[in-house]
Image: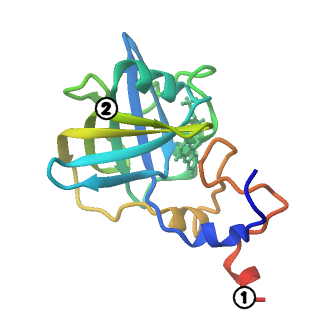
């Protein structure tokens, strides 16, 4: 159990929004993630944090590769819905989405994307509910000019929420609006 924290502080942390993908044999999957960060420069390494209940977790854990799409601000909620609120255990997420296969074999979503990267897992840390996968970047590609989608833009303009499997999920009785903090 966490100590009695004012969880509104966590809403002040900044993130981007991404589609993280992986594959398992001939199966592909992907999900929305806000927790992608570059962790070292040389070699270039990135970390992603994935809930153990997610199918994407199983795929990365087995294949030890993952792909990242950096989304842009034009991304509509309709596009994010299947990737962020549905599991690949129940639906196939790539039927109406443009993507290509990367050098690692991961599907890379190219729609509403400013750039792409792929990584091979170098290490992983068990966090209980989630795993941090740290990967060596093995491929990067800029697709087009655009403004990367941020978590703040998602919350403020798309009126988006975080589901329970997201690390940033806030139980409904906890308020995370900035203006409530200032009262
Ligand atoms: C805005 C947003 C951010 C999210 N961030 C994460 C994240 O960082 N890590 C995570 O494991 N799940 C995150 N999720 C939840 C997953 O996208 C969601 O559980 C998805 O349905 C898992 O799909 P899968 O079972 O096909 O892998 C996020 C969802 C949304 C909408």
Q: Residue at x 34, y 34 (%)?
A: 123
How far across and how far down the image is residue 64, in percent? 34, 25
- Determine whether label 2 and label 1 are within 8 Å by CB: no
In the picture of the structure, the residue carrying the numbered disc 2 is 121
For marks 2 and 1 on the same chain, the one whose residue lies earlier in the sequence? 2
Q: Is residue 39 above or below residue 19?
A: below
Residue 142 left/right relative to 131: left
- Assess mark 2: CB under 8 A from ligand 1? no
**Residue for badge 1:** 182
Q: Image quadrant of ligand 1? A: top right
Note whether 180 is above or below 29 in the view shown. Answer: below
Residue 121 horizontal side relative to residue 126, left or right: left
Between the residue at mark 2 and the residue at mark 1, the CA separation in whole angstroms equals 42 Å
Say above or below: 148 vs 71: below
The image position of residue 13, as x and y in percent, is: 53, 68
> Going 73% across and 56% down the picture, which residue do you hit?
2
For the residue carrying disc 2, how many other residues have a C-alpha within 10 Å: few (<14), some (14-19), or many (20+)?
many
> Most extreme residue toward the right, as rendered?
173
Which secondary structure, mark 2? Answer: strand
Q: How is the image coloured?
A: rainbow
Q: Is residue 81 left or right of residue 139?
A: right
Question: Is label 2 or label 1 in front?
Answer: 2
- The count of marks equals 2
Identify the residue at image location x=51%, y=62%. Answer: 151
As drawn, the residue found furthest toward the left would be: 42
Identified at 59% across, 22% down, the residue is: 91
- The secondary element bearing badge 1 is classed as loop
- Which percent across, then down, holds residue 111? 36, 43
Quadrant housing the C terminus: bottom right
Q: Residue furthest top?
A: 25
Residue 112: % across, % down: 38, 49
């Amino acid at each position: 159990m966490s100590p009695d924290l004012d969880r509104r502080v966590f809403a002040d942390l900044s993130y981007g929004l991404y589609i993280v993908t992986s594959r398992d044999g001939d199966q592909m999957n992907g999900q929305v993630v806000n927790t992608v960060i570059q962790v070292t420069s040389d070699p270039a390494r990135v970390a992603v944090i994935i809930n153990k209940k997610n199918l994407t977790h199983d795929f990365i854990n087995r294949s030890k590769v993952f792909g990242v799409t950096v989304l842009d601000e034009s991304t509509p909620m309709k596009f994010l819905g299947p990737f962020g609120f549905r599991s690949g255990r129940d639906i196939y997420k790539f039927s109406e989405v443009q993507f290509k296969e990367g050098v690692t074999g991961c599907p890379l979503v190219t729609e509403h994307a400013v750039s792409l990267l792929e990584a091979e897992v170098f290490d992983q840390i068990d966090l209980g509910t989630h795993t941090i996968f740290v990967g060596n970047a093995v491929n990067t590609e800029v697709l087009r000019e655009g403004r990367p989608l941020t978590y703040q833009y998602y919350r403020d303009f798309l009126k988006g929420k975080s589901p329970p499997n997201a690390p940033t999920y806030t139980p409904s009785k906890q308020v995370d609006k900035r203006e409530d903090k200032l009262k």
